[in-house]
Amino acid sequence: MANKILEVNQFSYSYGHIKAVDGISFHVDEGEIVTLIGGNGAGKTTLFRLMLDLTEANEGSVCMTFDTPTESSTDATLKIDPSESEEWKRYTGAYIDESFLIDFLTPEEYFGFIGRVCDMTKEQTQERIDSFEAFMGNEILGQKKFIRDFSAGNKQKIGIIAAMLNRPQLLVLDEPFNFLDPSSQMMLKKIIRDYNQESGATIFISSHNLQHTVDLSTRVVLLEHGVIIKDLSNSDGSAEKELEDYFRI
């Protein structure tokens, strides 16, 4: 049986009289690529913000479980409630929106800052930046301008790269294909898939794009009005027909 890396228990959150997240419980297993899908206002971003302790839930809790091997044991684990400890940040990479960026830095300065926070050497940081060279193209490094002056698509790329620099066990990305041109979307899909296969990392993303969802995910969670209405296995692309029927494509 796979280990649960993320467990959400009875999350609820309201904006005034609007219930954005309504008693949600689910788990994500180690090594899965799970996509949260739903229309605008379904509660996807709010759920991610609750999970990452960026917004305080009205009710409910979350538990993250990470492998922390030591010299004496290869199967040590650490269970963390993000609302009670910052330790989860060592094992998690996330990009939700531009608020995650430090926009008065250049991309080089920002990546260097992330590397230092994650206790990486300059050499390690540079090696990992270099692995995203094709994804960045010639549009991000060496531009001599601040992050705030980049296009929305390049800001998106900077945030995604920063989230992956520490090679996290859990990667959380909210609408990562937004603002990217088709070529960059295809490249990102390959980056996510390869990272999952090479590292065994768990990937939890949200997306409006059904084709990317079906191509990439091992599991699809459908959210509507703050409630999970379907939790579909997609290891063989089997979720496609049900998603098309739901969205009436």
Image: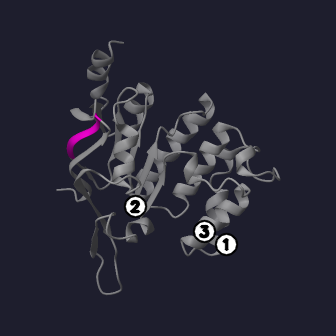
Mark 2 is on which residue type?
Answer: Gln
The N terminus is located in which quarter? bottom left
Q: Indicate the colouring scheme.
A: one colour
CA–CA distance in space, label 1 to label 2: 21 Å
Name the residue that disc number 1 marks: 123
Amino acid type for the residue under numbered disc 1: Glu
Q: Between disc 3 and disc 2, whose residue precedes?
A: 3
Check disc 3 and give the amino acid type.
Gly
Rendering coords of residue 204 (x, y %): 38, 47
Q: With respect to residue 11, does 165 lie above or below? A: below
Confirm whether the magenta stretch covers residue 132. no
Residue in view at x 34 percent, y 51 percent: 50
Residue 59 location, x and y as percent? 22, 51
Q: Which portion, as a residue range, is magenta?
A: 17-25
Give the structural element (helix, strand or loop) at label 2: loop
- Point out the tag, 1 or 3, that comes first from the N-terminus: 3
